[in-house]
Image (cartoon, rainbow, N blue to C red):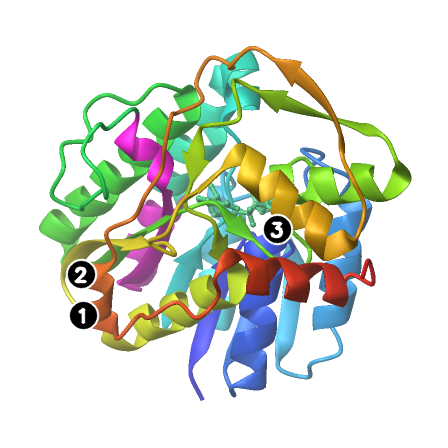
Amino acid sequence: MKKVLITGAAGFIGSNLAARMLTEGYRVTGLDNFDDFYDPRIKRKAAEKLASFPDFMMIEGDIRDPELLDDLFRKEKPDMVIHLAARAGVRPSIADPQLYYNVNVTGTLTLLEAMRKAEIRQLLFASSSSVYGNNKKVPFSENDPVDNPISPYAATKKAGELLCHTYHHLHQFNIFCLRFFTVYGPGQRPEMAIQQFGRKIMKGEPITLFGDGKTRRDYTFVDDITAGIMAASDKLKGYEILNLGNSDTISLIDLVHNIEETLGKKAVIEWQPMQPGDVEITFADISKAGLLLGYHPGYPVDKGLKKMFTDQGMC
Ligand code: NAD
């Protein structure tokens, strides 16, 4: 039976991934510090659900704690690490760049060092479409230059990719850096647009849209992301950067109309100027992931929204 360590297993993507891997026969250890970026009760609930699987164990702790990692690797000896733990989110990274650096860069380095010592050399790293910054060429390809991040968050994810390459080169790690494009689905982080809009529209509260509504995002349903991660875990060899997106974009205002339609309720919209750090468009070229992983997303936005809000009991 394959044993994996998932960092950030109590989070949105981590808990969805852990459930899927457990269902498919993996043994999963989760590591999470249940930080207060958003209500930790949401993470506790997700961890409780995972605890019903006999092959799951959750360790509460911090990726920046080298002793804890040494101990964990000695006892659990996972075959592979899927590193999702991070401070996520573009806007809050501008308010507290030091914290983002500590968790996302120092934390990733601490993990890589502990893996080197334990001789575990299989790693999937959660990177982000934000590394493309305000890339003008669409769709975004893994070969495009990513030297112009426009938020501390994006810079920490790029730094993580660079550290991963260094450990591949020096210590023969096999590492895939997976650039996720705005992920949504059941259990999505509460501050993210779709989750926040859905909650507020249901309550009849106003939603705030930044910019003119024309910014475009490539929204990826979480089941497609977890399928991509699992395929990557099967093919993991060498060092690769891979986009995992839906490869379709929708404008902010059309997204809101789609949510309204799904929930059967009109949104009250308040407009605000575009926020610093926000990009105009994200749009994934997923041909490399298609070729290497057989990755083919199956959720257009309307189908994904329907599944998300139905699962959450909102429609
Ligand atoms: P999330 O915040 O729900 O999950 C992250 C988890 O990591 C949380 O449970 C948190 O408690 C944990 N964590 C944070 N700091 C930690 C630390 N120091 N030690 C141990 N655990 C810690 O976020 P998510 O949306 O599930 O994102 C998962 C990963 O995917 C992150 O690396 C994020 O940057 C990346 N990503 C997410 C998206 C998206 O749209 N959700 C897009 C691109 C990349």
Q: Amino acid at mark 2?
A: Lys
Residue 64, how many percent across, how many down? Answer: 49, 38
Residue 251, how many percent across, how many down? Answer: 47, 37
Label 2 to label 3, Cα distance in Å?
31 Å
Q: Amino acid at mark 1?
A: Leu
* Residue behind label 1 places its C-beta within 8 angstroms of ligand 1: no
Label 1 to label 3, Cα distance in Å?
30 Å
Question: Which residue corresponds to mark 3?
Answer: 32
**Observer able to see residue 74:** no
Seen in the image, is 178 located left or right of residue 64?
A: left
Q: Nearer the viewer, mark 2 or mark 3?
A: 2
**Observer able to see residue 115:** yes
Question: Which residue corresponds to mark 2?
Answer: 288
* Contact flag, marks 2 and 1 (Cβ < 8 Å): yes
* Residue behind label 3 places its C-beta within 8 angstroms of ligand 1: yes
Badge 3: residue crowd in 10 Å (few <14, some 14–19, many ≥20): many
**Magenta segment:** 111-133
Q: Is residue 221 above or below residue 272?
A: below
- Label 2 residue SS: helix
Q: Quadrant of ligand 1?
A: top right
State the quadrant of the C terminus: bottom right
Question: Which residue corresponds to mark 1?
Answer: 292
- Residue drawn 74% across the image and 67% down it: 311
- Label 1 residue SS: helix
- Residue drawn 62% across the image and 62% down it: 15
Seen in the image, is 272 located left or right of residue 262?
A: left
* Contact flag, marks 2 and 3 (Cβ < 8 Å): no
- Residue drawn 39% across the image and 67% down it: 297
**Among numbered discs 2 and 3, the one appearing first in the sequence:** 3
